[in-house]
Amino acid sequence: MGIPTALRLARVETRTELAAAVLMALGAVGTTVGALLPNLWLFAAAAAVSYAADGYLTARGTYLVKLLGRVGAGVGNRFLLRQLLLVLLLARTGLSEDSVIYPALGCFVGFQALHAVHRAVVTLITKRRRLPFATRNIDLSGLGIPDGPPPWLVTRSAEKMLHWDLVAVAGLLVTGATGVAGWGLAGCTGTVLAGVLRTLLLVPYTLGRRLPPGRDAALGFLNDWLREHRPTTVLYFSGSKDSAYQVNMWLETMENVDGVPLVLLRERHLLPQLAATTVPVVCVPSAVHLMNMDLSSVRVALYPANVGKNIHLLRVPTMQHVFIGHGDSDKIASVNPYSKAYDEVWTAGKAGRDRYALANVGVRDEDIVEVGRPQLAPIQTWTGAPMGRIPTVLYAPTWEGWSDEPGNTSLMPAGENIVRRLVESPRPVRVLYKPHPFTGTRSPAAAAAHRRIVALLEHAAERRAADPRWAQEAARHADAHAAARAELARIEARLEALGHSAAPSARDEAAASRDARADQERAAQVKRLRQEWDDAYWQSFGWWEHKVITGAEPRLYDCFNRSDGMVSDISSVVSDFIASGKPYAVTDSAGLGEEEFKRQNTAVRAAVVLGTDASGIGALLDAVSEEDADPLIRARRELKQYLLGPDTPPSMQRFNQAVRQLAAKAEARNDSQAPQETDDLSGATASAVRGGRRSGAGHGPGASETTAVG
């Protein structure tokens, strides 16, 4: 079994983590054998290895450590096991129970009790320092949020607390070696005192003057801010932390939208995943709190996803509600019947309008507005086949979806065939593989296919590195690659520092909201550093090297710009890639046949169609290598306009025009309903009463908050 296979089985990311996992296991075996023999020196050496490896893996937050916790071998139990094995070792060495064994047992039992108290205090502080909302880019100085505990007291607090048992362990080991009980007693005393002191240092932060204002005061402050700030356009989003990309893709558009923008989130776990932005952000998890927010100035609400929690804002009639989606594709999700709950549906081009007409799901043609895709501005236009280098082909499959419909993804039926034909092509190509962030989250088969593709690419990369031609090329660029990697490390350190200055502690949510104020200079610096990071990343390895790219960075559009062609599935990835004008292939995973596949899926009309055996990949390789061998250039140009709309006026201009027109429509409606308003209601609750209820309203806080419907 090779190291890559071992890495996958152990669910660790690097060889260093794999080595630490092996050492932790060896340490557990060594301490057990040392206690049973007994052999004090074997136990001491194994314990040292165990502490070091365990501490490294816990600090890294690896999946292996989380898995151990799920099966009852969490960090607390691992420390307790070492402590009990030490007591067993001392007992088997014949030391007096009265002078050593009983004090050691008392120390460790008492320390475990202290650890439980310590965890309870930390949990209480975390809970009591949590506001009913969280914010970014909003000045909360008037709310009077006090500082929380210093990070060294609460960051990885359980692990740090448990490590104080090292004082007792060291003292008892010295006692075992010398027979002098005083060393063990001193160590046990030191451990208990350290645990008591660490807990006492946290207690003041549970008291009133160290806590942020209560719920009512905080919500009142937020409503005062809303009345002063008067947002007019809201981007509303709810979803899992893995779905944050769906809101992130709209942040730059919101920064350039006409009016006063606001991002409204529903889950706290989205905030750490949120990309850098200068737009004010409010996260309100409670439906009741959301419904009582003063959003009376908002005229347009934009929704990137169809989820159950949308109903909590859709019920407000004083604003116009728009489904903008998080992609434009021929997938069934792009014509979800839920879309008729909105006042308007905005699509990129005429293709989106035609999809709804064909689907006949209740969305009226007059409610559809073509606004283009503002996010596609960073995508560079194709300048022709590459000169002086081998072409790069991006494989960017979508995920398996919520259902088992054939054709959802090419991963299982075709992924390995696609990658194998690319890496084994007689005409050399470089392959970039960037899977969807949700890949494997629902289907074990998709996760397994992904792992096989990664293994295939890693093996191909090793073969290419051993090839004399590419080895010589690597030697020529070695210094440049090393310099780029050093630059990457510098940029990442700087971005990390800027990130910490914006959010000092993930545990101290109140302080994070207080300190994450809008900073235009910092935002500009982060944007510049991210561009520098992107440049350094692509310069840190050879232009001929195969690469597996996961995570948020580099972004999908960066991969578009570094590729000469793409293979994908029926998803918004294809529609977006069409903006580049480059050749692409789409996999007929359901086996419909080329004619029917093109009939059912607009984005395939200018694509090379691949079967599950990927036998047609040669046509794509011809197109990316020689412009004269590309018969679909004109078809791609025509399809681009149909899918994404015209190049002029720019998409952002069309988007803003749609925002202005809809805001005026909301204003006119509100004016017509003004005589029916009541003066004794305020906030979203009042808005829901004023002017009657729209389609789907009438659902209160008990409405479904989590069900995804698209």
Image (tube, helix red, strand yellow):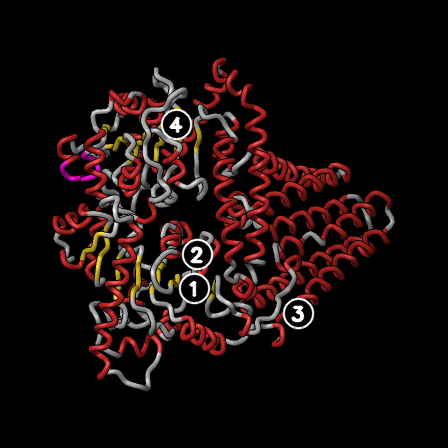
Q: Is residue 441 magenta?
A: no
**Element type where label 3 sits in the image:** helix
Check if residue 603 falls in the magenta segment: yes
Per the image, the residue denoted by label 4 is 431
In the picture of the structure, the residue carrying the numbered disc 2 is: 270
From this view, report whether residue 423 is shown above or below residue 490: above
Task: Give the percent coordinates (x, y) of residue 647.
Answer: 26, 44
Q: Are marks 2 and 1 in contact (CB under 8 Å)?
A: yes
Three-letter amino acid code of the residue under disc 4: Val
Alpha carbons under labels 4 and 1: distance apart:
39 Å
Q: Going 52% across and 44% down the picture, which residue do you hit?
A: 529
Q: CA distance from mark 3 to mark 1?
A: 29 Å
- Looking at marks 4 and 3 on the same chain, the residue that comes earlier in the sequence is marked by 3
Amino acid at circle 2:
Leu
Question: According to the image, label 1 marks what residue?
Answer: 283
Identify the amino acid type marked 1.
Cys
Which element carries disc 1, helix, strand or loop? strand
Quarter of the view holding residue 475: top right
Is residue 264 visible to us here?
Answer: no
Frontmost residue, 153 versus 318? 318
Left or right for 364, reference 566 = left
- Vertical arrangement, residue 593 with respect to residue 367, above or below: above
